[in-house]
Image (tube, helix red, strand yellow):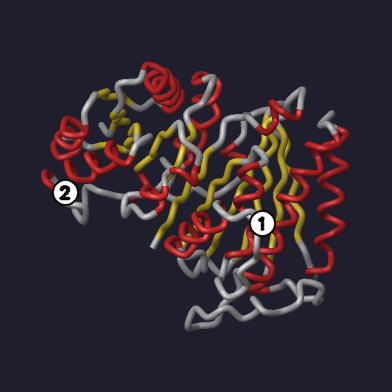
Amino acid sequence: MAQLLLISAKPEDRTFVETIAAATGLGLKIVATAEDGAEFISTQPVFAVFADTSTELQYQQLESAIQASIGLFSDKINANAFHFISSEELQRVHYLIKSQLFGHFIIRPKDPVEAGRHYARIVKSTQANRAFGLQNLLSDKAKVQIIKFQISTQKQNAVEAVKNYLLQAKFQSRMATVVANAVDELLMNAMFDAPVDDLGRPTLASTSRATAIKLDDKHTVELQIGYDGEFVGAMATDLFGSLDKNKLLSHISKIYTEEEYKVKTAVAGAGIGLATVFRSGGSFFFVSEVQVRTEVTVFFKRADSFREFKDQFRFISTQFYF
């Protein structure tokens, strides 16, 4: 039976992944070194690998061990399965963004049990054939509402509706505004950055965002919003499946280190404003099937103070199907 593999000597990482293993029903193997981890992957079926990669040396040891014992292009290696854990912020670990193994980035949580319960839903969703659907990413208490758009100019009304929904759910106004702004970014991307022609070239990237675009057939865009009493999740869906992993990660790395967020309209999928949202406490789950469908979900945990809200457990996860 496939297992989770943890490569770390840190007790908090062990608690985090043990919580995930318990919630997903998967076994767990824990090793302290990259060499032992690579050896285990080469001989046993592994569903997901969690690795402490807080330093570039740790990552290099992992990559070298896998290259030596398995090969980076082995059918036993799937970037969707690699979860990098770090105590550092994203701008300090550029070596992970460039990695061929990049699948998921986790900032080491302060409360590994609570974070493990939340992140387990991400891991569990990937056990299915396709990790689509917001309902699977929140607890059973979540009530998910679906908004389907007929024209792009309906976006602002939807964003205002999300903000009002959160205010009624007792989110502080400042927090509700942050979440609403994140939803605006997701919808903008789905409506204007995701559309491409048959050759994969962006068709609306240079179009004014005030333009009324009819959203039907391939241009259909859907928003799902759910709240389970603890986490709010918002998911924007497009039917182009044009999200390019390398461009996305390159974009994340570049904009995260700049003083100001700049939309790069020449890059499909570059309008998500990820750095701003991530710095504000949000986490992301990107799921894309090439030329079929892309879902981008943002998560926020409701908090009693804005400082707690910004300092919450965060991650960036990607799941690509080809």
Amino acid, disc 2: Gln
Where, by quadrant of the figure, is residue 123 drawn?
Answer: top left
User: Is 291 on the left or on the right of 96, as rendered?
Assistant: right
Looking at the picture, tell me which residue is in the foreground, 52 or 136. 52
Name the side, left or right, on which 293 lies relative to 52.
right
List x then y, in percent, for residue 13: 39, 23
Q: Quadrant of residue 44?
A: top left
* Location of mark 1 (residue): 260
Viewer-nearest of discs 1 and 2 = 1
SS class of the residue under badge 1?
A: loop
Is 138 displayed left or right of 224 in the figure?
Answer: left
Mark 1, other Cα within 10 Å: few <14 / some 14–19 / many ≥20: few
Q: Secondary structure at mark 2?
A: helix
Residue 209 at x, y percent in the picture: 76, 72
Instruction: Quadrant for residue 51, please give it.
Output: top left
Q: Give the residue drawn at x 42%, y 34%.
A: 86
Q: Residue 295: x percent and y percent?
A: 58, 55
Which mark, by number, is residue 278? none
- Label 2 sits on residue: 67
**Which residue does the image show at 77% across and 63% down from the upper left?**
149
Which quarter of the rendered picture does the C terminus lie within?
bottom left
Kind of residue at badge 1: Glu
